[in-house]
Amino acid sequence: MSKPQSKMKIWPHMAGRSNSRREFLVQSSAMIGAATASSSALWAATAPTQNATALTQLSATAAVAAMRKGELKAEDYANALLDQAERLKGINAFRTLHPESVREAARAADKKRAAGASLGTLHGLPLPVKDSINTKALPTTNGTRALRDFKPKEDAAILGPLFAQGAILMGKTNLHELSCGWTTNNQAFGAVRNPYDLARTPGGSSGGSGAAVAARIAPLAIGEDTYGSIRVPATFCSLAGLRPTFGRYSAAGVMPLALNKFDQLGPLAREVRDLALFDSVVTGTREPLEAVPLKQVRIAISPEYLNAGIDPEMGRIVDAALARLASAGATLVHAELPPAVRAASDVERAILGYELLESLATFLKSQNTGVSLEELIAQASPNLAPLLQGSRNPGPREAYVALLQQMKEINAAAHDYFRAHNVDAIAFPPTLMPAFPQGDAQVVEIQGAQVDLFTAIGRNVGLGSCAGLSCLVLPAGITAAGLPVGLEFDGPPGSDRRMLAIGLSLEQALGRIRPPPQRA
């Protein structure tokens, strides 16, 4: 498609950059790329000693390749990850973890290879699974007391292809209770801590999955995103996270918060290639993923809306990250979001208010949990009670019907936005601030002002959820206080493989930020 002539302009922040500044950014990116060893190179350098610390740094792609080749035993790899989990159990990333079951499965994988059997694409890979995703081998509590002993009869549909290709269920990760929040301050089973700062939230609701990957307990984990629940942990924990196009992965066997609208499973990892590996297994895609050069990529920026009101230091990090992308060849296009699309977060929030309780009740009954909606609400933690009680009387039916129509209009306007401006993605910070202290804050402080959480977190992530976009989050930098900052790239529905291919180049241009502190 030819690029249309338009009045669009490059984002103003880029206009004042001198050639020397651009050259410096290009050189810096090259130095970062040269200095940062890939996971496979790290494995090659440490293979003779089987150093456990080095094993925890491996990407999923590199670890599986080594296990398939016989250069690394699945049991040794599992032991390294399990030891890391034990050392960092204070993070409280897992709701359920049975080390001996993981070791037994790893030994079985080693025996399979020794026997010359055909090996799966994920041979021997321990995989943490968010505890809202049904597993027949382990309870699925959904982070709430009433379902503490719920043992599903079948695995969730998404797990079938993963296990068929050799993945091992590592355990069930902790989450915000019933997935209804962004902090994973779970009062039923304990709060999850951010590996970068144990006093802060890792984000949520997939906080346990995010914390496990950031802490090098596993290279890849499954989360679920209704309203930012993969993307918020990704940005708070310096991870790559994918919320794919709505419906790309089956949600069967997962407790929903809406009636077939927003709930979407997806992976969290430390490298885009691992996200692509996960996607290829779940979808059955066989074609290899090749990076798309950034000189072929057009990225929209909407600073007057999506960057408005963000934490100043975070703003500088986002600015610098976008400058690196421009220096690497990407075209940054100033194209403000239309008014209709700006309502996405408010519309999603309102629809969830209408559909939450019905969705929960339907799941409880269809899964034969033996728990009623009233029992679930009665046993919910105090910090969740206001949300559940507030959903009992969401409003008149006419208002709900109007919201559904508005959602359709948002979808249409978002699709038109990509076409009209001929852009591959729109880039913005997922949240307005870095990770804040763990707890039940309803507001956060930004530039001395009190900002409610639905604005500070929900405003930007609501776009991808409400319009069913393909959403990729990547690390962008780190604050002076050592807190990660991410960038979200939202592409049109159905563009997931292309977004991942672009992500390979975005990741290289953005560079890596330091891992969390080593902890005893």
Image (cartoon, rainbow, N blue to C red):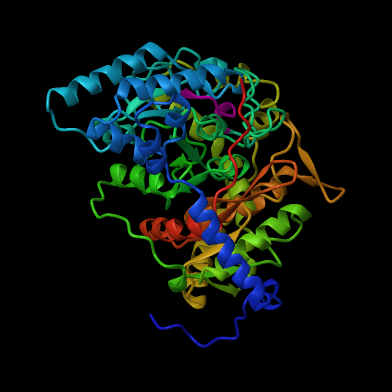
Residue 429 lies, with reference to residue 204, above or below; the image says below
Residue at position x 43%, y 73% in the image = 296
Q: Is residue 34 magenta?
A: no
* Residue 339 visible to the viewer: yes
Give the quadrant of the N terminus.
Answer: bottom left
Question: Above or below — where is 423 with respect to 240?
Answer: below
Q: Foreground: 364 or 215?
A: 215
Is 445 above or below relative to 298? above
Q: Is residue 177 magenta?
A: yes
Q: In this rendering, does residue 347 appear at all?
A: no
Residue 467, image x, y percentages? 51, 57
Residue at far left of view: 116
* Residue 370 or residue 305, whichever sits in front: 305
Left or right relative to 271: residue 350: right
**Which residues are the magenta region?**
171-179
Question: Which residue in the rendered view is the most extreme toward the right?
Answer: 448
Q: Position of residue 128 (x, y in %)?
A: 43, 28
Quarter of the figure with residue 385: top right
Q: Residue at x 68, y 28 (%)?
A: 198
Quadrant the C terminus occupies: top right
- Residue 252 lies, in percent from the top left, at 36, 35
Q: Position of residue 26 (x, y in %)?
A: 56, 67
Count the marks.
0
Left or right: residue 187 compared with residue 475: right
